[in-house]
């Protein structure tokens, strides 16, 4: 069975429930604060709960934040292959969560940025595996080793390759053109929200954006463009299909896109088509926003039951 290998940063999210953002230089009182795994950890946990064999190839440090990440991943059956970064802890992302479910982020850097071609190689990717990449890794010091590793991924005897799944993030629009070109040259699967796709191809039409993004990839296998509870557009095999979403009353949208990515790639590793996998992921993301933290990342059984009731 194909594996999902994630290369990006697993951070600790420090989530603060605030009534609103303070003015510059001001103060706001948080109603509650939680520490939980975030970043790549959400995709990996969502994938594992949806039945994938999930592997974290990114770096994890040594300290209380790193211990939280390792424990959370281990509890879900996710293997961490890279050796611990000694004497440096994993970083934190401060999340300001408003009652509207809107989020504002402040991210620190730590051990998760200490990577090399060798540390990525510990995941031993094989043709057929899906390697996930975040746009937030496409800056130094992670950019150079990551691109070198991606450009050297193996090709099987029958021509089968490792699929590179790019989640570009908002940062992708700010990257130098030469970096964008190199990344798109190795990307076979693109998954993003509508704003991120529009920044690349200049249209806010979801289905049209998916086809235009596919035209920017050297070896496109699938393109998925999400638009919240409107669902997503999926380009696969030269055609685009719009997959309706499952609107829910949102309590916390933090991690919804990551849950969608993890659930979708997991479904593909189980043999679903990209369109069917996207529908499964729409349901998983819909369930995710109805609660907070790791507890609201759904397991496969819950998603399939939700889909049965929807049908």
Image (cartoon, rainbow, N blue to C red):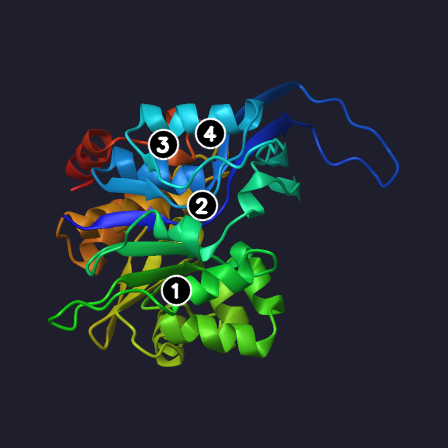
Element marked by disc 1: helix
- Find residue 267 and report its horizontal and vertical position in percent: 21, 47
Determine the CA span between mark 2 and mark 4.
Answer: 12 Å
Considering only order in the chain, which callout, 4 or 3, is on the residue closer to the N terminus?
A: 4
Determine the CA span between mark 2 and mark 3.
Answer: 21 Å
The local crowd at label 4, few if under 14, some if 14 to 19, many if 20 or more residues have their Cα within 10 Å, is many
Q: Quadrant of residue 207?
A: bottom left
Q: Tell which residue pokes out farthest to the top in this image.
A: 32
Q: Nearer the viewer, residue 37 or 238?
A: 37
Residue for badge 1: 150
Considering only order in the chain, which callout, 2 or 1, is on the residue closer to the N terminus?
A: 2
Determine the CA span between mark 1 and mark 2.
Answer: 13 Å
Residue for badge 2: 58
What residue lies at 70% left-to-right and 22% top-to-bottom? 30
Which one is closest to the eye, mark 2 or mark 4? 2
Element marked by disc 3: loop
**Is 238 on the left or on the right of 259, as rendered?**
left
- Find residue 283 and report its horizontal and vertical position in percent: 29, 42
Considering only order in the chain, which callout, 4 or 2, is on the residue closer to the N terminus?
A: 2
Which one is closest to the eye, mark 2 or mark 3? 2
Q: Is residue 195 visible?
A: no
Residue for badge 4: 69
Q: Nearer the viewer, residue 215 or 5?
A: 5
Q: How many numbered badges does the structure rendering display?
A: 4
Element marked by disc 2: loop
Which one is closest to the eye, mark 3 or mark 1? 1
Determine the CA span between mark 3 and mark 1.
Answer: 29 Å
Determine the CA span between mark 3 and mark 4.
Answer: 16 Å
Q: Nearer the viewer, residue 273 or 13?
A: 13
Q: Which mark is residue 297?
A: 3
């Amino acid at each position: 069975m194909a594996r999902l290998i994630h290369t990006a940063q697993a951070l600790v999210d420090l989530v603060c429930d605030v009534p609103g953002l303070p003015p510059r230089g001001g103060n706001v009182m948080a109603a509650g604060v939680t520490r939980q795994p975030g970043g790549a950890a959400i995709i990996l946990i969502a994938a594992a709960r949806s039945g994938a064999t999930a592997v974290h190839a990114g770096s994890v440090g040594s300290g209380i934040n790193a211990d939280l990440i390792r424990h959370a991943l281990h509890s879900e059956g996710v293997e961490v292959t890279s050796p611990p970064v000694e004497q440096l802890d994993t970083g934190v992302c401060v999340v300001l969560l408003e009652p509207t479910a809107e989020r504002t982020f402040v991210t620190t850097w730590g051990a998760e940025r200490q990577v090399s071609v060798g540390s990525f190689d510990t995941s031993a990717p094989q043709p057929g595996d899906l390697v996930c990449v975040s746009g937030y890794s496409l800056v130094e010091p992670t950019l150079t080793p990551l691109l070198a590793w991606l450009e050297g991924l193996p090709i099987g005897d029958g021509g089968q390759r490792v699929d590179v799944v790019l989640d570009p993030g908002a940062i992708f629009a700010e990257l130098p053109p030469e970096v964008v070109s190199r990344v798109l040259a190795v990307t076979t699967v693109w998954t993003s929200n509508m704003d991120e796709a529009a920044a690349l191809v200049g249209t806010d039409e979801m289905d049209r954006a998916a086809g235009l993004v596919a035209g920017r990839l050297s070896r496109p296998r699938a393109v998925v463009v999400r638009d919240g509870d409107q669902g997503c557009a999926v380009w696969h095999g030269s055609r685009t299909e719009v997959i309706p979403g499952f609107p829910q009353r949102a309590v916390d949208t933090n991690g919804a896109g990551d849950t969608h990515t993890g659930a979708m790639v997991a479904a593909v590793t189980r043999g679903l088509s990209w369109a069917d996998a996207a529908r499964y992921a729409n349901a998983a993301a819909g369930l995710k926003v109805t609660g907070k933290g790791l507890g609201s990342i759904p397991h496969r059984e819950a998603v399939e039951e939700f889909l049965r009731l929807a049908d």
